[in-house]
Amino acid sequence: MLDLAPPLLSVSPLDCEALDLLFGFDFAYRGNHNALLAEALGVGPALDRVAEVPGGRVINFEPSLTIALDEDCRVQVRVSTETRTNAFQVRTGEFVEEQMSVYVTARQYGSLEPQANYADTIDRLAQVAREVVDTCVTEQILKPLARTISLK
């Protein structure tokens, strides 16, 4: 499909503003997604005391981090979370089972390199994203989330 798109759509490698590849991981959970994420991943030393304010309840916690993998910041990887719990649900205690997501997005900004094509570029982004998933996301995010959900 990536080999056919440029000629069929009259798109050249110079027309590319950004190319993204996204891996998504969904967890079904009935309850406060934000509190679950804070419990499974921790909020970090700078926010620990805020999360422990007496009587406080976590109503928004969606950590995200983007890093550049080259000097020009053209190739980036973002690890982010998306919860679907809202303040009304926390207030009423009425939760439905919904998906909580972890996303790993590899992105290249700007035109393709002179000898590159869309398929090769996506393959390179997939390799980068797989490496981040394998070396960082699985053990540090996915497994702790799965473990915390299974204990609930």
Image: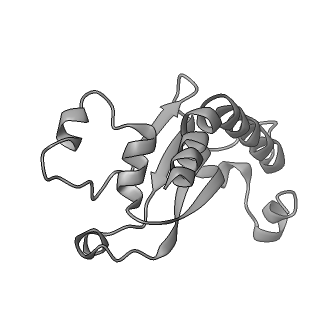
Residue ranking furthest to the top: 71
- Horizontal relation, residue 9 to residue 29: left or right: right
Here the colouring is one colour
The answer to whether residue 109 is seen in the rendering is no
Q: Residue 112 appears at what percent x and percent y?
A: 70, 42
Q: Which image quadrant is residue 52 in?
A: top left
Residue at figure coordinates x 73%, y 61% from the top left: 11
- Number of marks: 0
Q: Residue 66 appears at what percent x and percent y?
A: 47, 37
- Horizontal relation, residue 86 to residue 130: left or right: left
Residue at figure coordinates x 51%, y 71% from the top left: 98
Nearest to the observer: residue 39 or residue 117: 39
Residue at figure coordinates x 76%, y 66% from the top left: 10
Residue ranking furthest to the left: 54
Q: Residue 110 appears at what percent x and percent y?
A: 59, 43
The answer to whether residue 37 is seen in the rendering is yes
Q: Residue 97 appears at what percent x and percent y?
A: 51, 73
- Relative height, residue 32 to residue 134 (above, below): below
Residue at figure coordinates x 72%, y 49% from the top left: 13
Nearest to the observer: residue 93 or residue 62: 93
Residue ranking furthest to the front: 151
Q: Which image quadrant is residue 85 in?
A: bottom left
Nearest to the observer: residue 108 or residue 33: 33
- Relative height, residue 69 to residue 144 (above, below): above
- Horizontal relation, residue 27 to residue 59: left or right: right
Say which quadrant the N terminus sits in: bottom right
Nearest to the observer: residue 110 or residue 1: 1
- Relative height, residue 99 to residue 20 (above, below): below
